Image: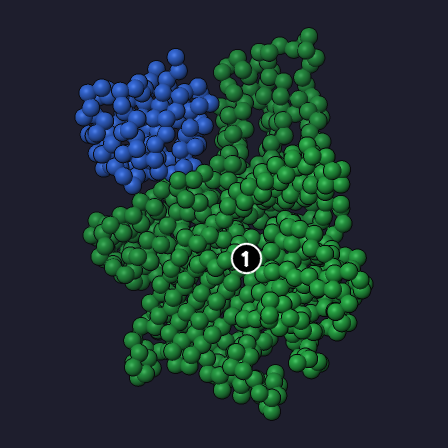
Amino acid sequence: MDKLKALFVTEALELIADLERVLLEFEKDLHNEESVQVIFRVMHTLKGSASMFGFDTLSALTHDLETVYDAIRDGKIIATLEILDITLKSVDHLKKVIHDPSLGNSDLLKKHHDLLTAIKKVAQLHHDEIGADYSIGKSFLATYYIYCKPSFSIFKNGTNPLFLIDDLVALGDALVLPRMDLLPDFNHMNPGECYTSFEVILVTDKPAAEISGVFIFVEDACEIIIEKISEANLLLHDSFVARMKGDHDLSVAPFGLEIVMRLAENATVTPEAKSVQFVATRVDSSSIRVASDKLDELMNLVSELVTSQARLSLLAEQHGLAELTNVSENMEKITRRLRDNAFNICLVPIESLVIRFQRLVRDLSKELKKEIDFVAEGTDTELDRSIIEKVTDPILHILRNCLDHGIESPEERVRQGKKKEGKINLKAFHSGTSVVIQIKDDGRGVDIEKVRQKAIAKGLIKKETLYSEQEIIDLIFSPGFSTADQITDVSGRGVGMDIVRRNIESIQGEVTLTSILGQGTTISIKLPLTLSIVDGMLVQIGDSKYILPLTAIDKCYEIEARRISSDLSQKHVFDGMLLPVFNLHQVFREKANEHGVIQIIKIAYEAFPIGITVDQVIGEYQAVMKPLGNMYHDQDEFSGATILGDGSVALVIDTDKLIKQLTAKVVENNVLVN
Amino acid sequence: MSKTILIADDSESIRELVEITLKSAGYNVLKSVDGVDALKHLNGQTIDLVITDLNMPALDGIALIKEIRARQDYSTLPILLLTTESQAAKKEEAKQAGATGWIVKPFAQEKLLAVIQKVIR
């Protein structure tokens, strides 16, 4: 039943998302009968399944909504924006109710009643007979202890005691503990007799009478105890559950009411104990559903395999056995393919996000009385599930900014000779091994002079110093910066863009902003395809090994060690070009190699290439990324660490950040040698 | 030989639930997501019972019943409606179309099985 419930939650979330999408379409054309049909049907399905799986509050609200749309369908009510508004609010509410169907949260409960009243009101304007009786609010969750010992002869009158247990479980969340202590040894056992008794911890909002109702036909054939043991949901208390479950020894005798009562008292009661969360992933109808924790497990196993594979390759190399090397190389190919496949499975299209964005734009543009044409392109672009989760909030924030500060009011736009509707374009596309999400508006753009003045006023920059336009624009991402003249509810508290940048950088992404005054702003978010494994180049610098992302590497050169000076920054000629080179031995304080040759790796950095020194290029390496932990959160030149075949650790260098830091340092010290 | 039951419901969770219930009672189960999908199974093979939802995207329950009744092979096939709907008018409509019985969601699994046993014997 729990599995089915989880299935229902996933399905319901999809239905709710569908509903939202159709409602947004319906808004554009309130006469569209087909939309009403679809809305009605989706609601109907939702209601039916919800009632089947005990989500009564969800079912009740959906029922009322459905009645309204039924009336619209039959032409008894005319669809209005007001009705649509309430429906969308209800949709938002349903998303929450599904995780808290008993409305344990008082805000949720109030909202629920408000919505029921609002729905009734819009419906009653035209229609009298609507609504059912709602028992919401009258009953609250409680935990019951139920002991049921069917008589030995219960099978003879055709009763299956398990049905009773099923009925109990259907009343709420339950922990069922079968007790087999009465089971005799095999020689004395009569298969026609029932030896099992049950202890059930049931969490339900149903009255006790309903629980005893389950046993109404078997009262004579069972010994029954039903007792309320707590006003709280004890199943949320791990210690209580663990204690009840014991060590799964079937011969354990029932605890009995007294002991269970004591355990219940011991379980500390915090009202907002961890509520059960279901994670739902949106999957195409042509595909199968997989629980997300199974995917995580798969990715973990693949990562482990990649690490073990590295060890195998190393062993094969050390032993120099041709046969072993053969097997190892073959394994490596398969591992790589398995890895790529596993990655692909974890990718989800950003489409699922776009509905949320559309919804935000719709609600906000209404609130701000702006007219917005929101277009999303490339919504089939796929990203790792975990990245999608983390990028949602930053994008929502950017859109909020766009609507609030970027797009002008319709009057102002007309005055400027622009179209009355502002345009926001969200585009997702692949670029190399990254995915770029671009949000472009045709609003007022960033006033660089205004930003500069503000930054000076806030003491972020010095008045005398000259800054490039891009440098000034970058100030928008500084903590506490806001250029809005007025602080509005929507955005503009000046805590936005720095958090956006920080969130995106925490998933190895990049955010950049370009803008033309009076014409609009473009914000680009560059994201890695995945976070867990990177294709890298293993290099030796001094006594340590490091990983460079393969995508960053352009070319490798060799140079005599004596020609490398101890300076941090120097220049050397390769392929007839002068290449700025950073001495990484200096940077990482590794022992410099004074004899033999040094390898210079040419890195593609922004517009110009940069060289870095390493002692030896060991070879390509699939690095399973492990986070560095909080101790190292300042070291953002490293994106993580990986475990090598021999068990040692190699740091993974984020070349962009490293070079950016070094360049800044060089400029600061003014030691750039020309 | 165990009997075969065809389910038509657009809700996956309900389909699964009904399927589990029926399989636990030893029935063979065929699943379909709507009326059109259900008709695909009516290709001459032996089906002992149809359990259908009322509201479905393509071909709703009542239209499905009419389609089934129009086919000679299946004109006497028992059809149960399993729906949240409980309006008398709808019931009457279904009865006219040729439905054998009506079960209201939410249903108790034993009740469903009891009704099925009566219908297909």
Q: Please tell me which residue lies in front, B44 or B59.
A: B44
Q: Please tell me which residue lies in front, A353 or B23.
A: A353
Residue B9 at x, y percent in the picture: 35, 35
Residue A538 at x, y percent in the picture: 68, 53
Please identify the residue farthest to the top as the structure is shown: A187
Chain to which the residue tagged by mark 1 belongs: A
Does residue A639 appear in the picture of this structure?
Answer: no
Q: Residue at x 44, y 20 (%)?
A: B25
**The color chain A is rendered in:** green
Q: Residue at x 47, y 40 (%)?
A: A289
Q: Residue at x 54, y 71 (%)?
A: A607
Give the side of residue B27 with respect to residue A6, left or right: left
Please identify the residue farthest to the front as the structure is shown: A576
Give the side of residue A313 with respect to residue B77, left or right: right
Instruction: Say if A510 sits above or below A178 in the image.
Output: below
User: Residue flagged by tag 1: what amino acid is it?
Assistant: Pro
Instruction: Say if B121 sits above or below A373 in the image.
Output: above
Residue A63 at x, y percent in the picture: 35, 47
Give the side of residue A312 with respect to residue B55, left or right: right
Q: Residue at x 37, y 54 (%)?
A: A20
Instruction: Say if A181 sits above or below A669 in the image.
Output: above
Q: Please tell me which residue lies in front, A656 or A48.
A: A656
Helix, strand or loop at mark 1 = strand
Within-10-Å neighbours for mark 1: few <14, some 14–19, many 20+: many
Give the side of residue A246 with respect to residue A292, left or right: right
Residue B7 at x, y percent in the picture: 35, 29
Question: Which quadrant does the C terminus of chain A fall into?
Answer: bottom right
**The color chain B is rendered in:** blue
Rendering colour mode = by chain
* Residue under pointer 1: A528
Does residue B45 appear in the picture of this structure?
Answer: yes
